[in-house]
Image (cartoon, rainbow, N blue to C red):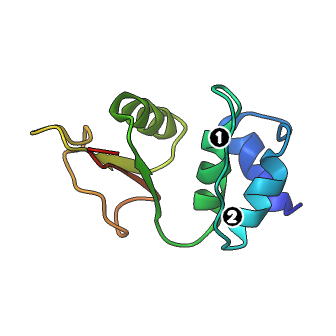
Amino acid sequence: MDSRALDLLRRVFGFDAFRGQQQAIVEHVAAGHDALVLMPTGGGKSLCYQVPALLRAGTGIVVSPLIALMQDQVETLRQLGVRAEYLNSMPGRRSRSNRPCSPASSTCCTWHRSGC
């Protein structure tokens, strides 16, 4: 395992180790490969895209059909010191910074696509 991923997991998220298949998924995605991951609620899916997004250069983009979850995750990332933004389909509803997501301003951007 890339020691940078484990270091990031500890430093940013406060976990000592990955659970279940998270490590294999993170390695796969961090290497630039696509993944379709099915896990139960609470299974740790978010780390499977958040850790690789923080390890790789550029901006990580997540498309989510769940506005409330998206908002909660962005707020949590911000509290952890990660630059994150979201944009959703609700009129007048953007991230607290009221900035659209852009590669220059964010590490992790999340968009909601209505009708998913």
Q: Outermost residue, right direction?
A: 1
In this rendering, is residue 85 above or below 1?
above
User: 65 or 5: which is nearer to us?
Assistant: 65
Residue ID for mark 2: 29
Determine crowd level at label 1: few under 14, some 14-19, many 20+ residues with C-alpha closer than 10 A.
Answer: some
Residue sitting at 78 percent across and 62 percent down? 27
State the image quarter where residue 39 is shown. Answer: top right
In this rendering, is residue 5 above or below 112?
below
- State the count of labels: 2
Which image quadrant: the C terminus? top left
In this rendering, is residue 63 above or below 79?
below
Residue sitting at 67 percent across and 43 percent down? 38
Tell me the SS state at disc 2.
helix
Residue 2 x, y percent position in the rendering: 85, 63
Tell me the SS state at disc 1.
helix
Residue sitting at 66 percent across and 26 percent down? 42
Q: Outermost residue, front direction?
A: 115
Residue ID for mark 1: 45
User: 80 or 93: which is nearer to us?
Assistant: 93
Which image quadrant: the N terminus? bottom right
Residue 61 x, y percent position in the rendering: 44, 59
Q: Would residue 41 be found to the left or right of residue 2 on screen?
A: left
Residue 30 x, y percent position in the rendering: 70, 66
Residue contact at pointers 1 and 2, CB within 8 angstroms = no
- Amino acid type at mark 2: Val
Q: In whole angstroms, how far apart are the C-alphas of marks 1 and 2?
A: 12 Å
- Amino acid type at mark 1: Lys
Q: Would residue 73 be found to the left or right of residue 12 on screen?
A: left
State the image quarter where residue 20 is shown. Answer: top right
N-term-proximal mark, 1 vs 2: 2
